[in-house]
Image (cartoon, helix red, strand yellow):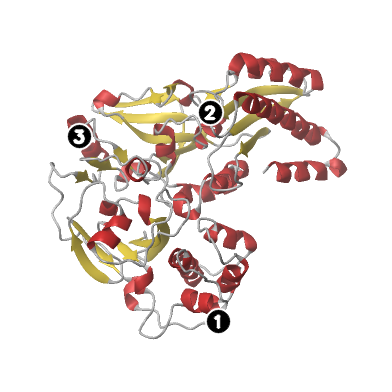
Amino acid sequence: MIDFLLNGQPRRCETAPDASVLELLRDSLGQTGTKEGCASGDCGACTVVIGEAGPDGRVRYHSANACITPAHQLQGRSLVTVEGLAQGEALHPAQAAMVACHASQCGFCTPGIVMSLFTLHEEQQQRPAPLTPERLEAALGGNLCRCTGYRPIRDAALSMEEHPWPRPGWLDLAVDATASEPKPAKDAAFVQPATLAELVEERRRHPEAPIVAGGTDLWLEVTQRLRRFERLVDVTRVAELTTIEEATLDDGREGWWIGGAVTYARLEPLLEAHYPAFAHLLHRLGSAQVRNRGTLGGNIANASPIGDTPPVLLALGSRLRLAGPDGERELPLDDVFLDYKQTALLKDKGEVIRAVFLPRPEAGRHLRVWKLSKRREDDISAVLGAFAWRLEDGVLRDVRLAFGGMAAIPKRATAAEAALEGQPPTVACFQAARAALQDDFQPMSDVRGSTYYRALSAANLLERLRLVIGQQQAPTQDRDREVMLHAYAH
């Protein structure tokens, strides 16, 4: 049973544990304004908005792809769809601006675009800021338009403030429909533990039950492969998995323990402040809808060879804190990935990722991240390279090179690292490192890239790294070239 608000009205629904928000809306509630396009979180036609109370009691809204969002995660939340925006004859500013700017033709993708603009409008009401091209790109990057073109949609986004709207009070209602409800029974098909202890106990009893956080990957098993899940364990309400805490490891390294269920969107401000290259990657990893739901822990546990964040974390020397029935333990991320989709997590005991350690940047240590994909944004990597190093007395130190898309697992290029460690960043040195990549990888071949393409691309990324390091050594007046090179790389 799910209790939530739909456009301000209380709803109680019963549905399957693996039903999506889109299925609930269209099949059970008759709300057909939300459309199914790709059923994989790529096109944005199914965009809805979910609200929940923040620490200050105010409701915060985020956009989500209804096709890959578990319906049961609406428990105690507020769901806003395109049907709820107009107040009588008064259209929402997003709707009115779309009409005034002639920003719709066939209309199939329009509801999703309107909901993304609604989210942007809400952000402007709570935290006004200039609508820069970058903000508009981030807000609308997850919505594909098949016939109108994006200029009038952009014009609509910029003109929303010209349209008044009687904002309904229910949008500010701090929802907690679970407050008066008993906790789900232990035999419930969709379990939402509130504490780590409850999660560990549930995993002990049912280690075979899949874990779901954002659902941005797991739910493709339902929509694309038509798989059914009879039982699911949701970690998005586990308090210990949703925190970011400063910490110092036993080896003296400072940094942050990032809870396994922390979303990319919550992680962005931290990365923008300390690791801009990593933050930039998140904008290429997925759309706002995906970043609002996807989690760092989920990207690691998925163990995909083309997951975007593991190579970066490998280059940074991250660690995992794991929790299970036998207690907690820590592992270097280097020891986590064993084989294709296989990790060192003790799945038979129901072990889960409690947190990921992100080291604080050290003075003089650099990070570069470059992703190659067919589309610039919201696409899966063909090859991803993450490179960390220090330049000390003219030689390279603490070199860590990690790649995605080059092996069955995200993996460091240890032979290439050895060729660079302690050497000056010369042409000959990097030539030796590129040759060493042949010992590190025998790349796979698939629809995203052939073995030859991947091997050549990885070698070229090392050459790009050499050029970047060379520019860092150049006189200050010559460093504009580095800026241009870095921009081109992204």
**Residue 312 vs residue 404, the one in the foreground:** 404
- Secondary structure, mark 3, is helix
Label whose residue precedes the other's in the sequence (1 or 3)? 1
Sort mark 1 into few (<14), some (14-19) or many (20+) by Cα contacts within 10 Å. few
The residue under label 2 is which amino acid type? Leu
Sort mark 2 into few (<14), some (14-19) or many (20+) by Cα contacts within 10 Å. many
Residue sitting at 60 percent across and 32 percent down?
386
Residue sitting at 32 percent across and 47 percent down?
236
- Secondary structure, mark 2, is helix
Residue position marked by numbered label 2 in the rendering = 314
The residue under label 3 is which amino acid type? Glu
- Secondary structure, mark 1, is helix
Looking at the image, residue 196 lies above or below residue 407: below
Looking at this rendering, what residue extends furthest in the bottom direction?
89
In the picture, measured across the screen, residue 103 lies left or right of residue 133, that is: left
Looking at the image, residue 260 lies above or below residue 171: above
Q: Quadrant of the C terminus?
A: top right
The location of residue 258, given as percent across then percent down, is: 43, 40
Residue sitting at 48 percent across and 65 percent down?
113
